[in-house]
Image: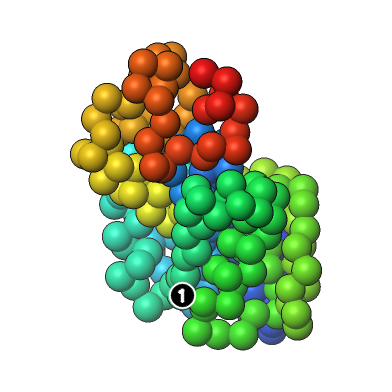
Amino acid sequence: MPTFEFEDMYYGQTVTGVDEAGLGPLAGPLVVAACIINNRSSKTLSLVNDSKQLSKRKRELMYNMIINNDDFLVSTAIIQNSEIDNIGLGKAWRHGVVTAINNLTSNVDICLLDGNKTVDISNTTVIPIIKGDQKSFSIATASIVAKVTRDRIMQKIHDEYPEYGFDTNVGYGTAKHIAALQKLGPTKYHRLSFAKVNNR
């Protein structure tokens, strides 16, 4: 379960948690979310966990509680598949992290970043934390926002292209998705720079 252990290391400074959804899928955008927790006594935090540990229904509930609550300051960056193809996944991810932080209506002193990689951000110290979404409330909250934001986008893409099963695979290379790619070819939402899309 997440705690405030890492946030407490930087008491008195503005700390944001950052996480992403959509690094590995063959289709759809990359979504990066940043979250500052303004009120550690928020009742919402009792329900917060790594988004992967929550059911879809609970993630949706948590998302609505987070973004409609002044206890949290949240922003997102959506990096489209075309940009991923143009600049590469690594640069797209770094751009998403910087954009999400810059979109916050607050200056950030410390960024707790899920994973083992860091990003250069002016006037912000970035602290990578492996499995950070399981350890930090700020990152766990960001993970929920990123995941639900992306899932909703993929549902809209599914409505446009139902043959690929995006409502369940959210763009990942499942057997159904690969079979649809082989039969129908890629959509405008596919990442053409990914080998599984090109080598179908």
Give the amino acid type for the residue marked by disc 1 in the picture: Leu
Where residue 163 appears, x then y in whole percent?
27, 25
Number of numbered markers:
1
Kindly identify the residue that appears in the image at 43 percent across and 56 percent down: 145
Residue 181, how many percent across, how many down? 41, 22
SS for tag 1? strand
For label 1, the crowd category at 10 Å Cα-Cα, with few meaning under 14, some 14 to 19 and many 20 or more, is some
156 lies left or right of 105: left
- Residue at image coords 50%, 33%: 26
| Residue 118: quadrant of the picture | bottom right
Picture coordinates of residue 70 (x, y %)? 37, 78
**Residue picked out by circle 1:** 73
Viewer-proximal residue, 33 or 127? Answer: 33
Say which quadrant the N terminus sits in. top right
On the question of residue 185 being in view, the answer is yes
Q: Who's the residue at 47% across and 65% down the image?
A: 76
Toward the viewer: 103 or 6? 103
- Name the outermost residue toward the left: 159
Residue 13: which quarter of the image?
A: bottom right
Say above or below: 193 vs 76. above
Residue visible at 34% across and 22% down? 184
